[in-house]
Image (cartoon, rainbow, N blue to C red):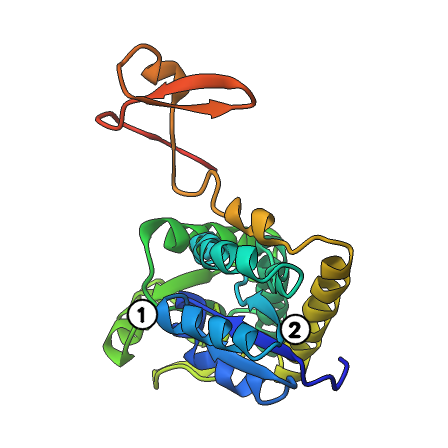
């Protein structure tokens, strides 16, 4: 990345990075970077950098499990971009779910080389039912592709919750259990298991950040700030509205491509996969 000090990089994270706390070590290795989480402080940080005449690139630090954070970030930036044209960009998210699956498969393969009968426990902090369900789906894909027979998920915020998940795996017959974080954590709570290390090395994470920033700056020169893309990040995330069911039920309407649909929110929803 250029040594140009007029570029401020903001690494924004949610539940995959302990609300941005796990990003601080990466910010130290990216020139002009700071770590943040969505909210008033994030808004003020970006506003202050723009007021100082800096160009701001915001990198959503997600492995694909927090699209709502990306959309919320974009909403904040949309308002600021209108007042600062050409000086604010939302980079593409750090990673996508297929990347997460591949990195977790790498961890599973490493555990298998160490002990073919071992189990892998993927650890994440609590978030919301949809993002947690996505992690269970990802773990299933890791196991399905043959890395290890037993790949589990622990939604754990402390030692006790992690210990309970490990105990469940032991009851299933696992003798050696390797733990790996599903996000950007460098460590995990102490537990009766072997820590497999961070999901990615710090150097690898920093390289991806540099790439995202370079791409965002190049796009900004071409007139694309990435914010509208970010606004659509959580489209279809969570419950999906069933238009066939809602037709004529007397809800509110919105338009898709020039035609309107009626929505009534007092009904059951179908899951989007």
Question: Which numbered marker is on residue 209?
Answer: 2
Query: Closest to the observer: 209 or 113?
Result: 209
Query: Closest to the observer: 235 or 172?
Result: 235
Q: Which of the image's four quarters has the N terminus? A: bottom right
Query: Closest to the observer: 24 or 135?
Result: 24
User: Circle 2 sits in a helix, a strand or a loop, which is it?
Assistant: helix
Q: CA distance from mark 2 to mark 1?
A: 27 Å
Residue plotted at (70% across, 53% down) = 224
Classify mark 2: residues with Cα within 10 Å, few (<14), some (14-19) or many (20+). Answer: many
Residue plotted at (43% across, 53% down) = 68
Residue plotted at (31% across, 10% down) = 248
Where residue 183 sits in the image (x, y, percent)?
48, 70
Where residue 6 sits in the image (x, y, percent)?
67, 81
Residue plotted at (29% across, 71% down) = 167
User: Circle 1 sits in a helix, a strand or a loop, which is it?
Assistant: loop
**Residue denoted by label 1:** 156
């Amino acid at each position: 990345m250029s040594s140009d000090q007029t570029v401020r990089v903001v690494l924004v994270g949610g539940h995959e990075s302990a609300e941005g706390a796990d990003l601080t070590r990466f910010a130290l290795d990216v020139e002009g970077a700071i770590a943040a989480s969505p909210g008033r402080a994030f808004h003020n940080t970006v506003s202050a950098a723009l007021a100082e005449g800096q160009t701001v690139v915001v990198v959503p630090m997600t492995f694909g499990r927090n699209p709502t954070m990306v959309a919320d970030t974009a909403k904040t930036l949309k308002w600021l971009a209108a007042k600062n044209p050409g000086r604010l960009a939302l980079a593409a998210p750090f990673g996508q779910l297929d990347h997460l699956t591949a990195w977790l498969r790498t961890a599973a393969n490493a555990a298998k080389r160490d002990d073919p009968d071992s189990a892998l426990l993927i650890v994440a902090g609590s978030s919301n039912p949809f993002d947690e369900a996505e992690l269970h789906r990802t773990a299933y894909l890791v196991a399905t592709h043959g890395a290890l027979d037993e790949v589990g998920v622990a939604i754990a915020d402390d030692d006790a919750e992690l210990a309970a998940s490990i105990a469940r795996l032991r009851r299933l017959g696992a003798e050696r259990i390797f733990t790996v974080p599903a996000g950007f954590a460098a460590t995990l709570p102490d537990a009766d298991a072997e820590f497999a290390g961070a999901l990615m090395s710090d150097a690898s994470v920093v390289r991806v950040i540099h790439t995202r920033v370079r791409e965002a700056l190049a796009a900004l020169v071409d007139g694309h700030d990435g914010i509208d893309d970010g606004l659509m990040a959580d489209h279809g995330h969570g419950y999906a509205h069933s238009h066939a069911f809602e037709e004529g039920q007397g809800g509110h309407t919105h338009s898709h491509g020039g035609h309107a649909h009626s929505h009534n929110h007092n009904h059951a929803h179908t899951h989007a996969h």
